[in-house]
Amino acid sequence: MAATEIQTNSPDLWLDQWPWPDAGSHKHKRGHLGCVTGSAASTGAARLAARAGLRIGAGLVTLLSPPSATLVNASVSTAVMVKPFSSVEDLTELAESCSCALIGPAAGVKAQTRDNTLILLESADSCVLDADALTVFSDAPEDLFSQITKPVVLTPHEGEFKRIFPDFLNQHTREKAVRLAAKESNAIVILKGAETLIAAPDGRLVRNTHASPFLATAGSGDVLAGLTGGLMAQGMDAFLAACAACWTHGELGLRLGPGLISEDLPDALPALLKEFYATRS
């Protein structure tokens, strides 16, 4: 793909790399996604992401929970596990078992979120950073970028993008801005919007317009982050996982249409996944 080329997102780009299980698969082989939750009153966003990650195929999904939120998380979780952490050592140990870790949804713009993000970047095999995990670095984004040495996907909407890449959208087109952001951060960047752009540090750029306006609802972005993390947890290439998650998210929105809420999206996945599965060679 040429540095100036922009591809249109479609299953043709990534479906042959979908991480399907085989006859010898078991839950541990299918990857472990860890999702850091917010405090007791702010757990829903991470739970949406966790459910999406589980639905899209991660063999294990764990809510990494502050002690204050553990009872809340445990009371509404079944297949998604809950593990509390109360120290750097606790979170480091939990993250080391994660093939992908996700942080940001309702995590809170506070020092603890900043510290937790840096721990995950060091300890997990790969990461998805969303929402508050981006905003918390708005005063010093280089502190975040300097720690990105593994596969990482950033999932900002335009407001969050401007906080960590403050001049790019003012000085450049969206396409050039997101390419520069991916190069500067050394991460895959999903710039969300009516036209979502997915950029890689090497210059690859994919445009996603396959979506529904009814995805403009609370929690939709958390589901997208969970879909991305669930695919990465299974070992899918981070750029392809980001592209696949965006198209799949958009397709679910189109199928559900008016009246959809974010809780509907993960539970609509099985029908779509069966269609994907039927095309495998």
Image (cartoon, helix red, strand yellow):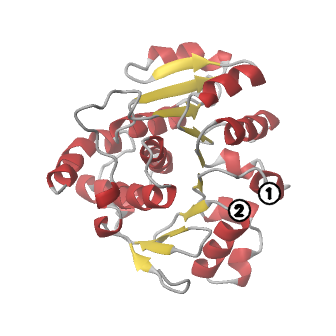
Asked whether 138 or 184 is in front, the reply is 184
Image coordinates of residue 209 in percent, x first then y, are 39, 72
Residue 186 percent location from the top left of the image:
68, 62
- Does residue 39 appear anywhere in the picture? yes
Q: Amino acid at mark 2?
A: Ser
At horizontal 41% and vertical 55% (from top left) the residue drawn is 245
**Quadrant in the rendering for residue 243:** bottom left
Rounded to the nearest angstrom, the CA distance separating label 1 from label 2 is 9 Å
Left or right relative to 157: residue 16:
left
Q: Residues within 10 Å of mark 2 (few under 14, many from 20)?
A: many
> Do the residues under discs 1 and 2 have CB atoms within 8 angstroms?
yes
Residue 275 horizontal side relative to residue 269, left or right: left
Sequence-wise first label, 1 or 2:
1
Name the residue rendered at 75%, 41% in the picture: 118
Q: Is residue 23 above or below residue 241?
A: above
Q: Residue furthest front?
A: 24
Instruction: Give the structural element (helix, strand or loop) at label 2.
Output: helix
Determine the residue located farthest toward the bottom in the rendered image: 4
**Secondary structure of residue under mark 1:** helix
At a point 39% along the width and 36% down the height, the residue shown is 58
Q: Report the disc number at residue 185.
A: 2
User: Measured from the top left, where is residue 53 in percent x and y?
Assistant: 42, 39
**Residue behind mark 1:** 141
